[in-house]
Amino acid sequence: MKEISKKDLLAQVNENYGEVDELADFKKQQGIEKKWEPIMSDPQDEKGYEGSYKARGSSFRSGKAKGSHIGHKVIDKTTGEPMVIFYPCEAQIDEFVATHNAAIQALKEEYGDVYMSLSKTNPNCEPRVTGSAGLTLHNPTTGGEKFVDTRVRFETEISDANYLKRYLIYPLINEVLLGDGEVGEHLEKCNIPRIKVSDRAHLDRHSTFSNSQLTYQTLNFYSYKDVRDFFNSAVRNVQGQTGNEEIEYREYHLARQFNKLYANWEKTRKNREVWIGFTPIYNLEASGLSPQTFDVTISTLLTIRGEISNNNEGGYNFNWEASLTTEHGKKLKSNNQLKKMQMNNDENITAQKTVPVGEGVDIRTKDGIANDESVRQGLTDVLESLKRQILQIPIQSQLLKAKLTNFELSPEEKAEMRRARAERLALMSANDDETGAVDVTNEEPPLQENFINNLVMNILSEIKK
């Protein structure tokens, strides 16, 4: 093997540095039409895209593409042909056409007809033509409309897991469980983290997911700096006084929580008083630790399980089970015996239902299960039951979890409470002097159970002496 000097290697690297992006763009080199390319308001000057209003996807995502994002070139899944979609506001079509006429004409010459999506005010939410519903597009040249079926049709385009999530799990959770917003609002009032339905960071991507057996899980955490913040937030939530400026918790996920190949990160990882900085490339919190130590953690875990089983009539059943589990834990700094952070199980709500798979449904395909009305109705019924139970969680009961006790208060907080009590007693005494009677019995704090037990033990020990 011929050796190469460091000097020659550096010279070759520097010489070919500008070619790296183009070498990696093998589809463009082979003349393969890309499934998705962003359309910008200005022509590009990047190699391979000189003078084109289309941009390389990597340049667009990194912010290097010139101009503003005004549309997409995508592959129409109904025909397999490329098409161009622009995204003007419905009331500003004429203005949009006048402003971006050069881009529109250039892409019409390349692709023929171009279309406009009147349902979107900007293209950022529609990076490719996929989804569970169709897309109606407007043709600015003819004034006509074109309906594009955006449903994924080809087995090679999407995995079983993504197909079942996208067309079965996500739509029904969003529609049945979270559609009217009641569940989210109730969880917020109960100081329980809201449910993140399709956020990849919060999902279990290590579990079994097929048309015959599936497990969907999404986990979310709230953490508070200390027990006082937790208590104040609980009080405001119960009273319905929480505003955006008053949110004191941190919402996050733990990347390794569902990993089954090695030890998971404990749920109280953000409560550890250790900080080792950020990762060099992606600037993430190294090892899942946080620069700010949190003393209180609350978690919400939504789990949906489904499985096909044989029935006694030669057919198949689909068994649905859904559950919502919440936990909370507090690290009590001033009591050495309770120093270690632990999570306590709070709510554990479950719902189950078994339904027959429709006749003629091919259980071997993801299409068959995801589109079977009986299977969909079974999941709908389970989610409706789960919703009813969630809305029955007593809001006031959450105050008990946030209640402050003596050993959770710092010496300064205890001194402040004594001072405030003394002021109240003095005020009551001044008011009652006018009537000649002073009654401060209501100001005496109730004896705590631990205090009473200690008092009894001290008395017994004195008697034994």
Image (cartoon, rainbow, N blue to C red):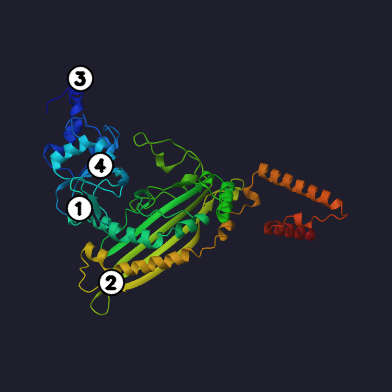
Using a 10 Å C-alpha cutoff, classify the residue at mark 4 as few (fewer than 14 neighbours), some (14 to 19) or many (20 or more).
many
Residue under numbered circle 1: 157
Q: Residue at x 56, y 45 (%)?
A: 226
Residue under numbered circle 3: 7
- Closer to the observer: label 4 or label 3? 4
- Closer to the observer: label 2 or label 1? 1
Under mark 1, the amino acid is Glu
Helix, strand or loop under label 4:
strand
The residue sitting at the top extreme is 7
Q: x and y percent of residue 38 in the render?
A: 24, 40
Is 416 on the left or on the right of 173, as rendered? right
Q: Disc 2 and disc 3: Cα gap in Å? A: 67 Å
Q: Disc 2 and disc 1: Cα gap in Å? A: 28 Å
- Closer to the observer: label 2 or label 3? 2
Residue under numbered circle 2: 309
- Closer to the observer: label 4 or label 1? 4
Name the one closer to the observer, 183 or 345. 183
Residue under numbered circle 4: 71
Q: Disc 3 and disc 1: Cα gap in Å? A: 46 Å
Q: x and y percent of residue 440 in the render?
A: 80, 55
Q: Disc 4 and disc 1: Cα gap in Å? A: 23 Å
Helix, strand or loop under label 3:
helix
Q: Which comes before the other along the chain, label 2 or label 1?
A: 1
Using a 10 Å C-alpha cutoff, classify the residue at mark 2 as few (fewer than 14 neighbours), some (14 to 19) or many (20 or more).
some
